[in-house]
Image (cartoon, rainbow, N blue to C red):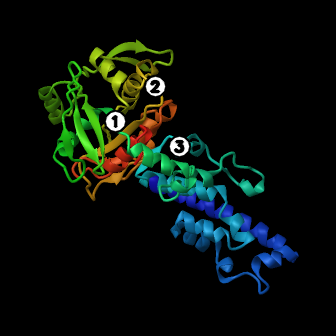
Amino acid sequence: MAGKIQQLNESVVVRSLRRFRDRYLSSAGKVASSDVAAIGEDGPGFLDSLPVDVQFVIMALLSPADICRLGATSQYWRAMVRDPLLWRYFLLRDMPHWPSIDHVTMPQLESLDAPLSSGDESPEDGVESKHDYMAEYLKGCPACRQQWLPPRPPYEVVTSFLQSLVSFSEPRFAMFGPGMEQLDVSMVTRLMHAPEVLPVVGIPQRQINGIGSGISYMFNNQHKFNILTLYSTNRVERERARVEQQSVSNKLFTLEGTDQSGYSIFSPAPQVQEVCQVVDGFIYVANAECGRGAGELEAAQIRAVVNPAWGSASRPLLVLSCVSRDDSEVVRSTSLGSSSAKGRTPCVDMAKRLSLPQLPNPWMVQDTVAETLSGLLTGISWLLRCSGVRL
């Protein structure tokens, strides 16, 4: 299914590029002075003369930055590389492989659901695209997104140095989610025994009734932070449910009913409410292994925890999209379908499944592997920065 959709998208893109080229070259045949300057005094170059199908293959092999550089070589290529169907194709092709996404770089997925062109129509024939797919791609692509973030003001360097001289209380984060309990490899256990990743530096004395004090870790050998782990039930019930692949009665939340749209409404247990009132942010460990998510219930429980009634809506939410092992046989299973039953849910699909774009909080989804903890430091770095820690 995914292969057929990809093939269809390629044919639509090539047809759109071919129509543009025919229109451009026919108008260039009138030998306007600007056209001569655009294509050179000796006529089109070798790359310009290639069939459109070959030009598309070349562009498909280039990085986004190289495509933009290609667009700077002439008026023809500037218009060619801005074709909306081309970047829509790149979005559909590459989004499943992005290792992270956040509230700033999340593409508008609704723009990808509706067909951009149909039949014999194309944007060059007068059907204008309402979305800038090129901007969406460059904003979300990990290799390009840093260029789209606002630059750091020069005074922040001095401010960061002065703040480094002042001691702050370590930030505290509440960690919960099915990915801590359902996976074959316990990410929490690995985290506690991986000093090369995040050294354990102690257990604070600040106790929360029924929860404990959490564990303090050291990031980058200079920034302490605390994680309070919230399990849905006791260890025996969690292990039985994991082995039998059954759900457990989540004691962290109480089902209050449904809203007008039929979505579940949860209320955190009293001890969880106390945690939500004192922490600086949240870590949700999602089970990213194929077929293990319960999107609507998970989204409702996340909404219950980040409810502004318990604290500021500016507190960040880090979602660790976690699998047990980094298996070379694991493929990414997208909403477009997959040829394998075994796969990892892509970050963009995870954000959609958990309804993260509807949250007022800043959020990030980061691919993580429980066995190696790969991706964890990237997520923790984002979480600390959003909590006011100067890294």
State if disc 1 and disc 3 touch (CB < 8 Å): no
Q: Mark 3 or mark 2: which comes first in sequence?
A: 3
Cα distance between the residues tagged 1 and 2: 16 Å
- Identify residue type, mark 1: Ile
67 is higher (above) or lower (below) than 194? below
Residue 203 is situated, as x and y percent measured from the top left of the image, at: 18, 34
- Mark number displayed over residue 283: 1
Q: Residues within 10 Å of mark 2 (few under 14, many from 20)?
A: some
Residue 194 is situated, as x and y percent measured from the top left of the image, at: 19, 49
Q: Is residue 298 left or right of residue 186?
A: right
Residue at x 35% of width, y 36% of height: 168
Circle 3 — which element?
loop
Q: Is residue 27 left or right of residue 361?
A: right
Circle 2 — which element?
loop
Cα distance between the residues tagged 3 and 1: 18 Å
Evaluate whether residue 181 shows in this view.
no
- Mark number displayed over residue 312: 2
Q: Mark 1 or mark 2: which comes first in sequence?
A: 1
- Identify residue type, mark 2: Ser
Q: Residue furthest left?
A: 236
Residue at x 32% of width, y 38% of height: 286
Q: Residues within 10 Å of mark 3 (few under 14, many from 20)?
A: some
Q: Residue furthest top?
A: 256
Q: Residues within 10 Å of mark 1 (few under 14, many from 20)?
A: many
- Mark number displayed over residue 207: none
State if disc 2 and disc 1 touch (CB < 8 Å): no
Q: Mark 3 or mark 1: which comes first in sequence?
A: 3
Q: Residue furthest bottom?
A: 42
- Identify residue type, mark 3: Val
69 is higher (above) or lower (below) than 268? below
Residue labelled with disc 3: 104
